[in-house]
Amino acid sequence: MSEWHRTEIKWTESEIEHTRHQVDKAIEELRFITEKISIYFKNSVYIDSMHVPTSPNVCASREDGITAMPPEVLIPKDDIHVFYKHDTLASWFESRFSEINKSIRESIIYEIIDEVKSLPIVDPILRGSSYSICRKLLAKFFIKNCKEGVINDASTLEEDSLRPFDEFLYVRLNRDDIIRDLISEYEKTHMRYRLWDDESINLLIQFLVKGDYDCTIFEDGAIIDFLGDRSVTENDFMEAVQDAILNLPISELTNTEVSFPEDSDRGIIFSEYVPVENMTNEQKENLLSIFFANLDG
């Protein structure tokens, strides 16, 4: 049985006072941000919970598991590991606002995903890859829910932060973070893929190895650099195909990936189709055979 002794762990008054000042400033930002963006977010719940602790929340590691300990802690005399949930007030504060920022993102994403349910399948917003779809969904949300001065149409899709929140110290609304989490949720709940058929496969092959001489964007084959290189493996080729699709340019007019052939009734958006790795074996073999045929000229 381990022998225990008592010790008291506290933070200094200056640490506590500094953190209280940070909390006051952060609460101002939190109130401001929820006034400027109409989202269902109970900021009062977080504000009320942000009382600066006066001592660490300490746990002791024992053979029978983790035992929570009060501020006046029993610590074993022998070498049993003792750790702190937050060993500094700075780590407590960082953890608290990481949770709050995550909750704001989740509130925005929940409202966007909920609204997707009301959109028709043929809505132009739902065209393209999950990335371009989520950029458009987020832009629509901002335009609809943000008050004047927060965004403008030109910044909606391009800037990675939201004015005037980009200068905040603690509450952060980073567009890239929101889009990343939104893509994950959208792909799980709403993303639909088209299935490859003979016509789409033939257009993909043309896009990859020949391009379209009448096209301003895809004049040459997307993987033309691979042609003539016999050291290219099957995996190299399939990765190059997927990269070519992922790197399709996005139209400034539609904010969706450009179709191939461009400005044609036959044009399709490759990023709307099942990912290359999920093609059937027959489809993959067809792609490979055409590719190696082009190697031979």
Image (cartoon, rainbow, N blue to C red):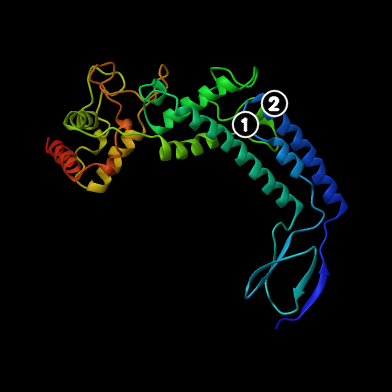
Q: Residue at x 69, y 26 (%)?
A: 35
- Residue at horizontal 26 percent and vertical 48 percent from the top: 235
Depth check: 276 or 216 in front? 276
Q: Choose top left, top right, bottom left or bottom right for residue 281.
A: top left
Q: In what quadrant of the picture does the C terminus appear?
A: top left
Residue 95 pos. (x, y %): 67, 49
In the image, taking residue 258 as reference, residue 230 lies left or right, namely left
Q: Residue furthest bottom?
A: 1
- Residue 195 is left or right of residue 61, and the answer is left
**Residue 193, percent from left and from top:** 31, 34
- Estimate the spatial distance between the alpha carbons at disc 2 and disc 1, rounded to whole Å: 11 Å
Q: Which amino acid does the dot numbered 1 rest on?
A: Tyr
Residue position marked by numbered label 2 in the rendering: 35
> Tag on residue 40?
1
The reply to whether the C-beta atoms of the residues labelled 2 and 1 are less than 8 Å apart is: no
Q: Position of residue 243 (x, y in %)?
A: 33, 38
Which residue is situated farthest in the front direction here?
118
Q: Horizontally, is 192 left or right of 55 in the view?
A: left
Q: Quadrant of residue 81?
A: bottom right
Badge 1 element: loop
Q: Nearer the viewer, mark 2 or mark 1?
A: 1
